Amino acid sequence: MLIRWTVALLVVSTMTACAISQASLTPVSDGSAVSLPENVKYIRNHVEFSLSQGEYRAAFADQKGTYYQGPPLCFRTKLLEAGWGGKHLQDKIFAVFDCVLYVPRDSRSDTVVYTVNGTGASTNFGHSLEDVDAAIASAASRQPSSPASRTSDGVNSLVAASVVNTSLTPAQAGAAGGLAGALVAGIVAVEKGKFETAAQQPTAEELKNLVHIPAREK
């Protein structure tokens, strides 16, 4: 039980650390974008992280840079070697999320990858591999939401389209289990829509093909 609570608390701390609320940012809808001509993949600690190819459209900005919203479920993680995740996860995509690329105005600063809380599916949050596959299949048939398209509560509409059962029951809590899983589920609901810094980031070299597309409308 102690291990389950420890896992749950690690998940909670990961979700709540440095999460950025969309309501704190300035919406952008000038048609500017960045583009990845092909999927970007990078490996850290036996896990493959990937960013989907395609256009990432300007959605928000702060004083230091712009947040570009990617295609549906543009951030994916795959376990390359069995270990902490178990053999059933080896060579499987076990987590998918909508994502955002933050491009600083200062060209000397690195681009940062954010995932969007409450989107997609992850075995870390109690979803099954079937849930992850279903999310991927759903993403293939939907279009990205319009940049800075907000609901009445200030949350970008991209969140609603890609959520796969974020209201987890204790039975769905996976490694966390029981009441620990309920804690994770509650945090998921509270943090929904916030931008979370991806735990592992690509290097500037790995993002060298990122193309900037100037504003096309006002």
Image (tube, rainbow, N blue to C red):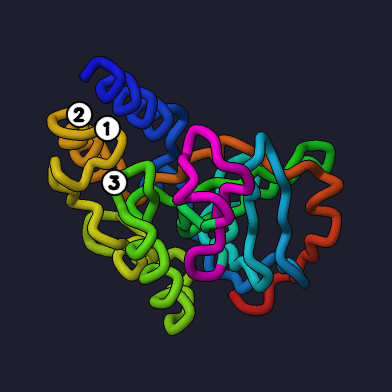
Is residue 35 in view? yes
Q: Residues within 10 Å of mark 1 (few under 14, many from 20)?
A: many
Residue 110: say if magenta: no
Q: Spot the residue most to the front.
A: 87
Q: Amino acid at mark 3?
A: Gly
Marks 1,3: beta carbons within 8 A: yes
Residue at mark 2: 180
Q: What's the mark number on residue 1? A: none
Q: Position of residue 8 (x, y in %)?
A: 30, 28
- Residue 104 at least partly seen: no
Mark pair 2, 1: CA separation: 6 Å
The vertical placement of 51 against 20, above or below, is below
Circle on res. 126 = 3
The C terminus: image quadrant? bottom right
Q: Which residues are magenta?
A: 71-91
Tell me if 182 is positioned left or right of 72 in this view: left
Count numbered badges in the picture: 3
Q: Is residue 106 left or right of residue 75?
A: right
* CB contact under 8 Å: marks 2 and 1: yes
Q: Which residue is mark 1?
A: 176
Residue 81: x and y, percent?
Answer: 62, 43
Q: Quadrant of the N terminus?
A: top left
In terms of secondary structure, where does tag 2 sit?
helix
Q: Left or right: 6 with respect to 80? A: left
On screen, 152 above or below 80? below
Seen from the viewer's position, the closer of residues 127 and 154 is 127
In front: 185, or 177? 177
| Element assignment for label 3 | loop
Which amino acid lies under the numbered mark 1 shown in the image of this protein?
A: Ala
